[in-house]
Image: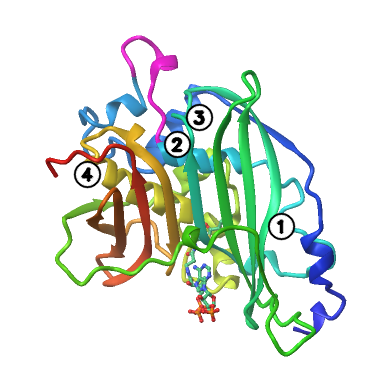
Amino acid sequence: MAGQSEFDPSLAVSHKFPDSTYSYTERDAALYALGIGACASDAVDEDELKYVYHEDGQKAIKVLPTFAALLTLESLPNGFDLPGLQYDPRLLLHGQQYIELYKPVPSSCHIQNKVSLAGLHDKGKAAILEIETKSYEKESGDLLCMNRSTVYLRGAGGFSKSSKPFSYSSYPSNQTSAVKIPESKPFSVFEDRTHPSQALLYRLSGDYNPLHSDPQFAKVAGFSQPILHGLCTLGFAVRAIIKSICKGDSDRIKSITGRFLLHVYPGETLVTEMWIEGSRVIYRTLVKERKRTVLSGSVDLRGLNSSL
Ligand SMILES: CCC/C=C/C(=O)SCCNC(=O)CCNC(=O)[C@H](O)C(C)(C)COP(=O)([O-])OP(=O)([O-])OC[C@H]1O[C@@H](n2cnc3c(N)ncnc32)[C@H](O)[C@@H]1OP(=O)([O-])[O-]
């Protein structure tokens, strides 16, 4: 892209992001749970009521592990701006998410975030940015979780100066989100319908990008109507795994990878297929109405029950 002629990837790679803070309460955790469909089809679901209600008060509610991805929300006050990188924010898509959890996410917390650039790739038609955020509990100083968010910037590639496309990663290759789906029959399949207003509810958890709410904006971005947040789809998929494989025990989730392969329209039905490989669950989520895979990835579990 001509606009990238001034872009120097080495300047971007050495860029230092400022530390940031984020605070949330049990109300945020409950709203998030509703936003990813917890208790949507059964208000007294015995696995899921604990994410939105507790008889001893909201401070005792359980927090879904994918809520950890929200802790990064205010970590980049200037969006994905890097020195010299030009991109059209309307063409930005969420490409992948990697989450590592070191302890259960508390129901309210003050967080200190350390942010760095974990990857930068020139794909010609797109630039890929990978932002790593380590989230610490302010009070104890304990590391709570790590997120690596991949953003796919359509139209922002072509900045490589040499014939070899520029590619930088600061992390091991076994932490990428691309997985091989087994050919065998899935161990478990879970079907869940998103609501037509799903994105409008989910955005209240803090991602207000108009791509998910504004019909005109969505059209400019290339979609017939506003699309679902990638992290909302990931939340549905991991909830399916907690229900189907972890018997409702979300503390078993150790790490999560997800690659967003295709957009989801709110109101569509998500079918999550799961396979077990040792202590890892490989999964793929399809949109039933369009018969298309929209997400795939893996989830590593602690203490997988041998009776499975
Ligand atoms: C972040 C906060 C904002 C949130 C916004 C949202 O929620 S938006 C809603 C949620 N998000 C969505 O709805 C997005 C859904 N996903 C999509 O629409 C498409 O997958 C796409 C447009 C991201 C890429 O499609 P395409 O046809 O342009 O791609 P291609 O197959 O021609 O491959 C080109 C190169 O890119 C690589 N690569 C490919 N995919 C990914 C990926 N996901 N991730 C990373 N990398 C990816 C691929 O390996 C290849 O590299 P190689 O092998 O040549 O070195």
Q: Is mark 3 within 8 Å of ligand 1?
A: no
The overriding secondary structure of the stretch rendered in magenta is loop
Q: Is mark 1 within 8 Å of ligand 1?
A: yes
Q: Residue at the location (12% across, 40% down)? A: 307
Position of residue 176 measured from the top left corner of the image (x, y, whole percent): 49, 62
Q: Which residue has dot 2 on it? A: 32
How crowded pointer 1 is (Cα within 10 Å; few <14, some 14-19, many 20+) is rated as some
Q: Which tag, 3 or 1, sits closer to the chain's start?
A: 3
Q: Nearer the viewer, mark 3 or mark 1?
A: 1
Report the span colored magenta: 54-64
Please state if 114 lies on the left or on the right of 196 as rendered. Answer: right
In this view, 2 is above or below 261: below
Q: Residue at the location (29% across, 48% down)? A: 279
Tag 3–tag 2 contact (CB < 8 Å): yes
Q: Of the residues shown, which amino acid type is indicated by label 4?
A: Ile
Does the stretch in magenta take in 57?
A: yes
Q: Nearer the viewer, mark 2 or mark 4?
A: 4
Q: Of the residues shown, which amino acid type is indicated by label 3?
A: Asp
To which quarter of the image does residue 201 belong?
A: top left
Say which mark, if any, is on residue 245: 4
> From mark 3 to mark 1, how far is it between C-alphas?
24 Å
> From mark 4 to mark 3, how far is it between C-alphas?
26 Å
> From mark 3 to mark 2, how far is it between C-alphas?
6 Å
Question: Helix, strand or loop at disc 4?
Answer: loop
Q: Which tag, 4 or 1, sits closer to the chain's start?
A: 1
Q: Nearer the viewer, mark 4 or mark 1?
A: 4
Question: Helix, strand or loop at disc 2?
Answer: helix
Q: Which residue has dot 3 on it? A: 28
Q: Of the residues shown, which amino acid type is indicated by label 1?
A: Phe
Position of residue 191 measured from the top left corner of the image (x, y, whole percent): 21, 53
